[in-house]
Image (cartoon, rainbow, N blue to C red):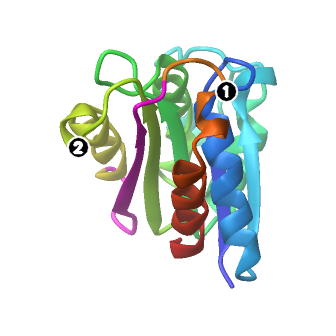
Amino acid sequence: MKNILIISTSMRNKSNSEILAQQALQGALAIGNNAELITMKDKDIRFCKGCLACQKTMKCVIKDDVSEILEKVKAADTVVFVTPIYYYELSGQLKTLLDRLNPLYPQEYSFRDIYLMTTSAEEGDEVVETAVGGLKGWIACFEKARFAGVFNGGGVNDANEASKREELLKAAREFGKSL
């Protein structure tokens, strides 16, 4: 049994990203994993100040919802970052969260496998290449962690569109089972 954390970074209600994240959660739970889905749309998450105090104190000086998320990331075996693709890149919300997870750098952490789950209007592997590169840059700072794979739910644009595509929902559940 793995401890899996799925973090959805879309700010849109009924977002395709969150719909697929929920399916991945169902898949992970169906095979007996301990799994949790966090959505950032209702969280107070501010920009990193770049002060690097966290490298000494192992805590961020900013008091918002990131400290709770950071503890869950730290304790997870597997982390799935879920993002809509904007201009062939990670969402700003996800990039901000990655920056704010900087206090993890000098600490012991449990995560080993890091996945990226995306949604995009366009289909194809090339749509997520830059986003994957951005996440791999973050992962490179954690020597025990590895990029374990990507799931791209391409071809969805309108809110809630993914919920109408049973083959995409099934694929997301299977992805969750494979974590």
Q: Does the segment drawn in magenta span residue 99? A: no
Does residue 30 appear to the left or right of 55 in the view shown?
Answer: right
Residue 74 to residue 137: above or below: below
- Residue 59 in the figure: left or right of residue 79: right
Q: Position of residue 76 (x, y in %)?
A: 64, 64
Q: Residue at x 21, y 38 (%)?
A: 129
How far apart marks 1 and 2 lie (CA) works out to 22 Å
Q: Specify whether 89 is left or right of 56.
A: left
Question: Is the residue under label 2 in contact with that under label 1 (CB below 8 Å)?
Answer: no
Q: Which mark is residue 125?
A: 2
Q: Amino acid at mark 2?
A: Asp
Q: Using the rendered view, name the quadrant where residue 176 is placed.
A: bottom right
- The total number of labels drawn is 2
* Mark 2: secondary structure: helix
Q: Position of residue 63 (x, y in %)?
A: 78, 22
Look at the picture and state if 12 lies above or below 90: above
Marking on residue 160: 1
Let me know if residue 63 appears in the view. Answer: no
